[in-house]
């Protein structure tokens, strides 16, 4: 039996596949460590949930430096999914995470469908995990490095196979580096996904004009931060028109107004990413800001904001810019 989370008379909670989340503000994978590193700076129990740093079967060192570059209103990263591996996570991180009252969602990254399945199967044996976010922006080594998330059939296949392994919420994190992200959202939904995370980082690069060399060791990397918010909003809006399952909106959220924008275009909840590096307490401030906004506007349930955009559009979102 679940309980309804209220804040000053405002319903803030929502449910995915029987799992209740106390509010709609989460921290994004890769921007908050494994959830235990910032506990002295932030009361993480106030969060709707924590998406852990990506986990693979074996530890990964990631890419060589330089692998983080600040850009105008954003950040380029080429971390390369560096992580401690699933077994070390279970032994060293999960015991602490089990003591928290917020939900823990484990992000899984892999280079083959088998690895995805192996990691999730091991995690299924553990207590304290509320659900999984699947990073399909990873390269599939058996397909020559092509990303799972740029092939609809592969997105559906990995979703379908993982669906048979768990009854917990299964969330597919989509890349924006495709022509029509809604097609991939539909593929994931049809294969059994419970929710979609939109968007992952955009491909970008930076150049050193003194050395005439790329600033990242890998030449290109993932662009995040406020610079990508307009694109992220459009992608969430597109996906919200295409699927019926919940959407986690991600991309450049730096304050309460940004979060509200994502809710209005169709996000069920939001994930705060790059801004965690600027202000580790930003998510808590946004939680408070949402409650204040609801109170000031006499909103008793945050859910009424979801998809409430007043847009009298006579043509499809895809046609609007063609």
Image (spheres, rainbow, N blue to C red):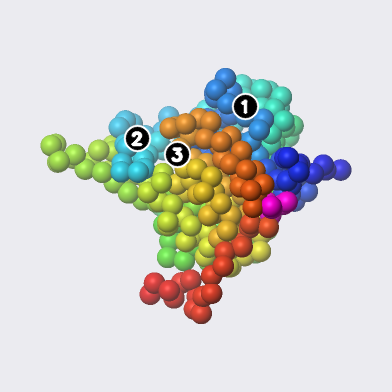
Name the spot of residue 91 as percent of width and height, x first. Answer: 64, 22
Q: Name the residue under label 3.
A: 274
The answer to whether residue 185 of the structure is visible from this angle is no
Tell me, for residue 43, which label it has, or none: 1
Residue 301 within the magenta-colored segment of the rendering: yes
Name the spot of residue 96 as percent of width and height, x first. Answer: 66, 22
Nearer the observer, disc 3 or disc 2?
3
Q: Is mark 1 on a helix, strand or loop?
A: loop
The answer to whether residue 66 of the structure is visible from this angle is yes
Residue at (62% x, 26% y) in the render:
43
Name the spot of residue 226 as percent of width and height, x first. Answer: 41, 46
Nearer the observer, 21 or 130: 21
State whether residue 297 is above or below residue 72: below
Residue at (47% x, 66% y) in the render:
180
Q: Is residue 267 left or right of residue 202?
A: right
Name the spot of residue 213 as percent of width and height, x first. Answer: 18, 40
Real-space CA distance between mark 3 and mark 2, rounded to the nearest whole angstrom: 12 Å
Nearer the observer, 111 or 105: 105
Q: Mark 2 points at which residue?
A: 68
Label 1 close to label 3 by CB (< 8 Å): no
**Mark closer to the chain start, 1 or 2:** 1
Q: What element carries label 3?
A: loop
**Mark closer to the chain start, 1 or 3:** 1
Residue 71 within the magenta-colored segment of the rendering: no
Nearer the observer, disc 1 or disc 3?
1
């Amino acid at each position: 039996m679940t309980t309804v989370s209220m804040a000053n008379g405002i319903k803030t909670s929502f449910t995915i596949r029987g799992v209740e989340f106390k509010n709609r503000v989460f921290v994004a994978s890769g921007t908050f460590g494994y959830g235990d590193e910032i506990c002295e700076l932030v009361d993480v129990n106030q969060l709707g949930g924590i998406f852990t740093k990506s986990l693979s079967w074996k530890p990964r060192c990631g890419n060589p430096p330089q692998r983080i570059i600040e850009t105008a209103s954003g950040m380029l990263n080429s971390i390369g999914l560096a992580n401690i591996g699933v077994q070390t996570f279970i032994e060293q991180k999960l015991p602490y995470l089990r003591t928290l009252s917020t939900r823990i969602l484990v992000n899984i990254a892999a280079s083959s469908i088998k690895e995805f399945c192996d990691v999730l199967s091991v995690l299924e044996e553990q207590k304290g995990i509320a659900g999984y976010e699947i990073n399909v922006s990873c390269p599939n080594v058996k397909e020559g490095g092509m990303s799972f998330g740029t092939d609809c059939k592969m997105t559906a296949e990995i979703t379908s196979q993982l669906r048979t392994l768990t009854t917990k919420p299964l969330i597919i994190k989509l890349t924006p580096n495709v022509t029509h992200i809604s097609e991939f959202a539909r593929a994931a939904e049809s294969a059994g996904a419970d929710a979609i995370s939109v968007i992952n980082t955009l491909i970008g690069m930076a150049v050193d004009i003194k050395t005439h060399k790329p600033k990242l060791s890998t030449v290109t990397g993932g662009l995040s931060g406020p610079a990508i918010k307009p694109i992220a909003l459009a992608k969430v809006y597109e996906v919200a028109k295409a699927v019926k399952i919940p959407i986690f909106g991600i991309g450049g959220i730096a304050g309460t107004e940004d979060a509200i924008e994502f809710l209005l275009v169709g996000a069920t909840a939001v994930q705060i990413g790059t801004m965690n590096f600027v202000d580790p307490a930003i998510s808590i401030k946004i939680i408070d800001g949402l409650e204040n906004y609801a109170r000031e506007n006499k909103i008793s349930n945050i859910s009424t904001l979801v998809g409430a955009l007043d847009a009298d559009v006579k043509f499809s979102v895809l046609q609007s810019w063609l």
